Image (cartoon, helix red, strand yellow):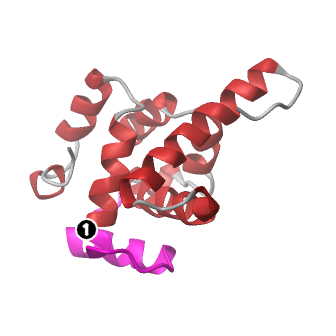
Amino acid sequence: MVETGFSSFDTMVDKANRLLRDVEEAFGWPKERRKQSYAALRAVLHPLRDRLPVETAVQFGAQLPTIIRGMYYDGWKPAETPVKMSNEEFFERIRSEFPYAVEGGNEQLVRTVLKSLERHVSEGEWQHLKSRVPNSFAALLP
């Protein structure tokens, strides 16, 4: 656990690190690849957020660890959402935001990151999220 000297901050950092570790462990990445796990999470969260109706995006964001929530909302333009995009357009956006190669490609990256995220939000919110995306995309959600 990181020690900041302020227990609330320590808890926030710890929760964010647990989510990033989940991504790293799923890929078998060492902790030294923290930038890569952060980039993977960001690359998946931003197009997901933009694809959701505003209310759903906010409800989902409220479930994220505080530090990750800041990254989730970074650069968001609610007035321009939801953005309609096919799965291929979704994967293309991830390719443009995630500069690393991953075994299994971007679809595996999305599935892995979403599976890690699922463990950090309530079951009810996860089901709500699944109900608010197109069926073709819902198939990617664990």
What secondary structure is marked by label 1?
A: helix
* Magenta stretch in the rendered image: 82-106
* Residue visible at 85% across and 22% down in the picture: 6
In the figure, is residue 90 to the left or right of 72? left
User: Relative to the observer, which residue lies in front, 119 or 81?
Assistant: 119
User: Relative to the observer, which residue lies in front, 62 or 64?
Assistant: 64
Q: Is residue 91 magenta?
A: yes
Instruction: Give amino acid for label 1.
Output: Glu
* Residue visible at 23% across and 75% down in the picture: 88
- The answer to whether 136 is drawn above or below residue 101 in the figure is above
Q: Is residue 88 magenta?
A: yes
Residue 9 in view in this figure: yes
- Residue 70, position in %: x, y? 64, 43
Query: Where's the N terminus, which quadrant?
Result: top right
Q: Which residue is mark 1?
A: 107
User: Relative to the observer, which residue lies in front, 132 or 119?
Assistant: 119
User: Relative to the observer, which residue lies in front, 9 or 76?
Assistant: 9
Instruction: Give residue 33's quadrant in the image.
Output: bottom right
- The answer to whether 58 is drawn above or below residue 103 in the figure is above
